Image (cartoon, grey):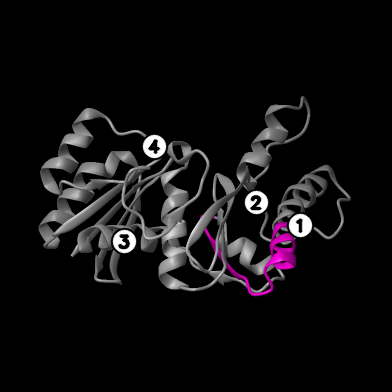
Amino acid sequence: MNLIIDIGNTKIKTAVFKGNNLLEKNSFSKTDFFSILENISKKYNIEHSILSSVGKLNEKELDLLQNLFDPIVLDHSTKLPFINNYATPKTLGVDRIALVAAAVNIFPNENVMIIDAGSCVTFDFVNKNKEYFGGAISPGIEMRYKAIYTFTANLPKLTISEKIPKVGNTTKNAIQLGVENGIIQEIEGVISQYKAKYSKLTIVLTGGDTIFLAKNIKSTIFANPNFLLEGLNSILIHNIDE
């Protein structure tokens, strides 16, 4: 069985796969780090594991991981199932690497754009020949709300709304309309740019804001909140098979 460990900026996610089948996943804070991983080690016979980290682990946490699972640590030098044409591969986020790996695994021989809507919104493109060229990074919904509150004197601190206002007839509605409709129009615009060049284009939406955005984006998309975990598993399998 394979264990996937994804250390994010705010949360830690783990997933246990048998082959390509997801058996269990967890999302938790660092306070539960030791108990969750020790429970997984007792519950499953973990044969292989991979660690993807954009957040930081302390020495004690790293020692626990090494002792329990001895994971492959994903970085720019890890063997990948696609051709990485990024100009600065050492600076490419491991989360973006995993998303591209998922794309070539789940949608082989297709042009794929992956949109990851979390703290930031990332756009990544890989063509039907498994060639990755890069994409774009933009502030996410929560970051946009925080920026408006932080860099102004009188505007309120807001969070994502259940329904986008049709008219900004109050300050609250105006901010929500600007932030949420703005990010939707941005995503639709980027999709349109790529569709103009690639008539056959598969769009995948993932990340923390998947559910909200999937309800409001008009373009045909595949919404998959587990896409990054599946990508990490495909990288692990690729390295096991090598």
- Residue position for label 2: 160
Q: CA distance from mark 3 to mark 4?
A: 19 Å
Q: CA distance from mark 3 to mark 1?
A: 32 Å
Please say whether residue 226 is visible from this viewpoint.
no
- Residue position for label 3: 233
Q: Is residue 18 left or right of residue 220?
A: left
Q: Earlier in the sequence, mark 3 or mark 1?
A: 1
- Residue position for label 1: 185
Q: Earlier in the sequence, mark 4 or mark 1?
A: 4
Q: Earlier in the sequence, mark 1 or mark 2?
A: 2
Taking the spot 36% from the left edge, 55% from the top edge, the residue there is 80
- Residue position for label 4: 55
What's the amino acid at mark 3? Asn
Element marked by disc 3: helix
What's the amino acid at mark 2? Ile
Q: Quadrant of the C terminus?
A: bottom left
Q: Earlier in the sequence, mark 3 or mark 4?
A: 4
Q: CA distance from mark 1 to mark 2?
A: 16 Å
Q: Is residue 53 left or right of residue 162?
A: left
